[in-house]
Amino acid sequence: MSQNHENFDRSKVILKKPSNMLVGYFIAMILVIFSLWPLKNDNDIIIEGFAVSLLVILISIFTPALLYPLSWVLHKIGGIVRSIINPAILMLLFIFAVIPSGIYLRLSGKDPMKKNFNKGLDSYWVKRYPPGPDPESLNKQF
């Protein structure tokens, strides 16, 4: 079996977890956004959401270790979402960018990589115009 310098096993990807304090700030920010959301429809704000967000901010400042279980759960959910969303985005990129480009190039008869085989050619070497530097000037490249 041949060895490769690349490790293709993605099942053991280790991501750095955010600090418990940052998780608390994130949750508090989400709670504030949801508390202010009724203002969009000219309704009253949700005071309970502000109270809970203030409590979460105080916990994240003074005892962030209490937020560890929440941080762990959010980290696991993020890993699951990442493993689903990344391949889906790459698939959409391939479907909407690469495939139409290939179809366009085939229909227009263009061959930018010059993959067509021609038995009549002696060489596939591409002539450079204008010609490059003198070959004798490249005797000490490295």
Image: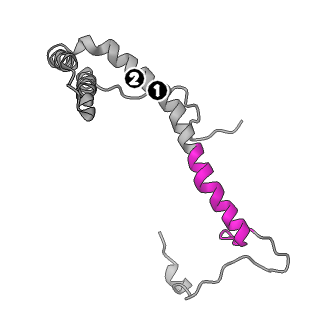
Task: Residue 65: give x, y in percent of width and height.
Answer: 24, 13
Is 93 drawn above or below residue 74 in the view shown?
A: below
Would residue 105 be counted in the magenta stretch? yes
Q: Tell me what residue is drawn at x 60 percent, y 83 percent.
A: 128
Mark 1 nearby-residue class (10 Å; few <14, some 14–19, many ≥20): some
Q: Quadrant of residue 102?
A: bottom right
Q: Tell me what residue is drawn at x 36 percent, y 28 percent.
A: 16
Would residue 92 be counted in the magenta stretch? yes
Q: Which residue is mark 1?
A: 79
**Magenta stretch in the rendered image:** 91-115
Is 69 drawn above or below residue 74 in the view shown?
A: above
Task: Residue 72: give x, y in percent of width and height.
Answer: 37, 17
Report the front residue among 134 and 120. Answer: 120
Q: Quadrant of residue 74?
A: top left
SS of the residue under disc 1: helix
Left-right relation of 99 to 117: left
Residue sitting at the far right: 119
Q: Which residue is mark 2?
A: 75
- Tell me whether the residue at label 2 lies in contact with that at label 1, contact meaning CB atoms closer than 8 angstroms: yes
Report the front residue among 110 and 42. Answer: 42
